[in-house]
Image: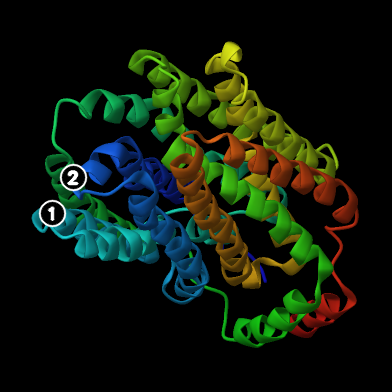
Amino acid sequence: MTTVRVSRAVTLLLVATGFAVMFASTAVKGVYQVYFVQLATHFGQGRAQFAWSGGLFMLATGLMSPVVGALSDRVGPLRTAAIGALAAGLAYASAACWHQSLVWFSLAFGIVGAFGLAAMTFVPMGVLVDRLFEARRKGLAYAVVTNGTAIGFIVLSPFWIWLQPQAAWTTVFGAVGLVFALPVAATLWLLSRWEPPAPGAAVAQVQASAWAIVRRDPVFYVLAAGFFGCGATMAFIDVHLLAHWQDRGVPRLEMGYALSALGVLELVSGIASGALALRFDKHRLLAGFYAMRCAAMLLLLVPQAGVLPFALLFGSSYLGTVILTSMFCFERYGSQVKGRVFGLLFLVHQVGAFLTVQLGARSFESTGNYVQTIVALGLVTGFAAVCSWLGLRRGASLPPAAHAGAGAQA
């Protein structure tokens, strides 16, 4: 497939749009994260019981990722993001309106909101980058776009922490819902007219053969095993980290600084991983990022270390795993199936997230702390580092069947 050429001005506009979408999408999880304990109290639930709403959200995001990938291939990534913004907005606004029903909250946030987040983040933005840039530039361009999440951490996380004691969750959920459903969704839909079109009809035939390649390809399972650990650790940050720090008596201001530092390092790691992948073996870089993630999780077991070293180490690994996995996926399977294959990888990513949300809640209910969960996450990410180092040494090479499929298209 050849990349459709668009003007430099349009390319910059679409990259900026993708960055802004990733920035705004952090609110979907960030508000829930900050109000987690208050929400559990509001609905008369313990953390373990209420964590099912977050677990449902994580699992549904994964289940929606292949759907979002197929939708991005069919209607375009920015139209997909516009649909996602509308869905997320309706989910948040309705949860605020019918705030007495735990069932409604779980369905709205856990399913509709999950679709909204999946439709605004990594999978459609990967498809957008694939359509805009040639192969050599895709990794760095994807790093720039996905760093919207880093800026979201830097700017929005401290804001939500400051806002939490000032405003009720229903007020914040309603306001966030209106912003997503109206200006964000409308703007994305209008801008979608500028994005490059999908490949020709012949791509559908290549996609059908590529699925058979994925199912039989051991490298795909190595990538999935690592991405499972990525999702598991990110879920702990999204749901349980602030509660863990609150239980340790960490001051609110210190938590805000730590999350901002995590976001700054996320920004740096995103750009660095895209640039380093042009010069060094990607399997070693990916293994290194997972090793850093493992060390960061183990630092949570050392209260004397404080919160900043964890934030710096975890932040340094945050986007590197996503960007390098995306690059492996593109180089191995081709951009024709990137949306669907990356969506499937994100399904595995979110299964890890779902299990971590539940494990963390159960661990807290049974022991009063998150030590068991943190140890488990350290082991999972250590295993991911080993798998990436040993199993991806020739991961960028296409299997023979894939070469045949590519040749058939040409």
Residue 124 screen position, x and y as percent: 48, 60
Query: Quadrant of the image for the N terminus?
Result: bottom right
Near mark 2 (Cα within 10 A), the count class, few <14, some 14-19 or many ≥20, is few
Identify the residue under disc 2: 42
Residue 27 screen position, x and y as percent: 32, 42
Q: Are marks 1 and 2 in contact (CB under 8 Å)?
A: yes
Q: Quick check: 73 above or below 237?
A: below
Q: Quick check: 292 above or below 312?
A: below
Give amino acid for label 2: His
Q: Quick check: 361 above or below 276?
A: below
Furthest residue toward top: 304
Q: Is residue 310 visible?
A: yes
Furthest residue toward left: 97
Near mark 1 (Cα within 10 A), the count class, few <14, some 14-19 or many ≥20, is some
Furthest residue toward front: 366
Mark 1 vs mark 2, foreground winner is: 2
Identify the residue under disc 1: 99
Name which residue lies at 36% across and 30% down: 157
- The disc, 1 or 2, on the residue closer to the chain's N-terminal end is 2
Name which residue lies at 34% across and 60% down: 110
Name which residue lies at 22% across and 30% down: 164
Mark 1, secondary structure of its residue:
loop
Compared across the picture, whether 248 is left or right of 144 comes to left
Compared across the picture, whether 172 is left or right of 23 comes to left
Residue 94 screen position, x and y as percent: 15, 59
Is 276 in front, or is 319? 319
Q: Is residue 278 visible?
A: no
Q: Find residue 266 and name its label.
A: none
Residue 342 screen position, x and y as percent: 61, 63
Q: CA distance from mark 1 to mark 2?
A: 9 Å
